[in-house]
Amino acid sequence: MTLIRKKGLSLLAATGVVTMALLAPGAALATTTAPTPPSHSMPPSHPTGHGHAAQPAQQTIWRGDFDSSSSAWTIDTAGDTASWHGWTFTPRDDWFAAAEPMNVGCDSDVDQPLDISCFLDERNQFSRARGTLAVADNGIAAANGAVIDNAHSVSTSLISPSVPVEGRDAVELVFSSHYKQAHKAVARVTVTFDGGEAQEILRYSGARISDNEGGDVLSAQEVIPVDVPAGAKSAVFRFEYTSNKPELYWALDDVLVRTPLAPLAPNAKGTTVQVFSDIQGEGLPYLDAALDLLHREAPKASAALIAGDIISGPKENDQEAQLAEYKEVSDIFAKHKMPPVYPAIGNHDTRSSVLSLGQQVDNFIAWGNQWGAKIDNTYYEKVIDGIPLIALGVEAGTTAAEGGVSEEQVQFLKDRLAYWKTQGKQVIVMGHYPFEWSVSGTYGSFYQNSSRVQVLENIIGQYSNVVYISGHSHWSPYLRDWSGRPVTEGGDPDGYAAFNTGALAMEFGPNPINPWDEDSMTDRPESPTVMTITKYDDRMIVRDFDVLTGEKIQELTVANPIARD
């Protein structure tokens, strides 16, 4: 599984702990030991009889994505009719192209130093964006001739069709939001029921008391609870943007209205796994504290998942040196009470130009088995106290055209995901590499998927019950897009849940020289992070923690959209 590694600086958009729901949930799963999972060579099993069809615990009432339903929306813009003035439906890449400055060299390999106007005002950092977006962009509108000033302010509304809410006490409005705060600009969302008075449910502005605390909102998912008045039959949502400056923007994607998540039962019992990635040698000084923190947060964890890059793996490593690196990690593990460890193979685990890929794969498998993995390949399936886990990874014996992933691995993923869907189970899929345009930083040119890796995402994208965890990027989980809900072409319209595990080693972020590249962070201390995932029958709760402070950074509930009632 080959993706281009990057070059890389860094940037944090710390917003404190964020708690949200991601898509569907209600009851509890006892942490009993599961039977031995099928091996990857077995065909998918038939579902066991439950006597009824699967029922979603959380339902999407209306989906307002702009790829297939832009005609259902109404745009109301006052004044100027210049191109890009007011809300505009546009393919994502066309938006970026329209923002490129005229007559300014923006090729980082040729034009040095780059003009500041080449940096797109962070438009390209909308990692959640795929396909067609709705954009209100004053900067591009002004470049196309629109007059925007105190006497000619922009006032534009994007209006949903009527959404049925009859019989509901409450709903949630969910959308991806990418917003840069211009001087005196105001963005707000309102709802009206049955044509009644508009109620404001979200506001961005320069005021610190606004929902954006006066700042930018980059690549976020907004989840807004909305109480439905008794007897109301329909709701209309308006996205309103006003500004008197010829600059900056608000972009939207993946709008939907859904039923809220039922509260978790007070006596619900879940199964928890620990998660971390990218030790890479440089993360060794943080490993003790990371394992202590994970033990405090999940003392009865059923497993520890490592999303790749266990070792640093210098290119000059011979067999003795590579085994010595694995031993450094093992020596720290030996000081802690470790649950069974299930690793995914990373690029640093196979970097040696002295050893063959086969030798390095064997070293990786041997190390994993030392800590209880019981695996014989880099891709495998385990059932951890009721949690299906599928690990993916580069294999020995594959060709360059296959990108490190054999046809057998592709078929294995297809078969196992199809099987777990019949069982109504959420599945954790773990790979070292994130997919492009999914989580923090993956907008960059360094995350272009190979054709075989894209095949893997297209398979995963068929299943809204997949929670995909990846390392590799080293981007901080403090960012709003540490998680995402990517929708693949032809895939499930609710997409799959993607999570960036962060890293124990160095942190990465946007490159100050090239807006499509990244760079390593040079400041200290760095920001090593770890995760826990707790699984219930109808949901997974994912929590991320800062190793240096011990504090929770993020929490997100991912509902099981195929949970059985």
Image: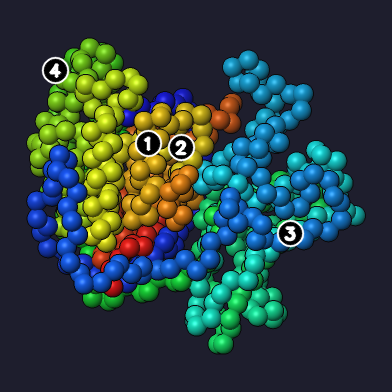
Circle 1 residue: 455
Do residues under tags 2 and 4 come within 8 Å of each other at their CB atoms? Answer: no
In-image side of 529 versus 165 (left or right): left
The residue that appears at 85% across and 50% down in the rendered structure is 81
The residue that appears at 45% across and 34% down in the rendered structure is 508
Circle 3 residue: 75
Q: Earlier in the sequence, mark 4 or mark 1?
A: 4
Q: Earlier in the sequence, mark 4 or mark 3?
A: 3
Do residues under tags 4 and 1 come within 8 Å of each other at their CB atoms? Answer: no
Q: How many angstroms separate mark 4 from mark 1 (CA)?
A: 36 Å
Q: Residue furthest bottom?
A: 231
Return the x and y of residue 193 as percentages of the image width and height: 63, 79
Return the x and y of residue 542 as percentages of the image width and height: 34, 56
In-image side of 315 versus 242 (left or right): left
Secondary structure, mark 4, is helix
- Place residue 359 in its image quadrant: top left
Q: Alpha-carbon neighbours of circle 1 within 10 Å: few (<14), some, or many (≥20)?
A: some
Q: Earlier in the sequence, mark 1 or mark 3?
A: 3
Circle 4 residue: 320
Amino acid beneath label 4: Glu
Amino acid beneath label 2: Glu
Circle 2 residue: 436
Amino acid beneath label 3: Ile
- Nearest the eye: 82 or 311: 82
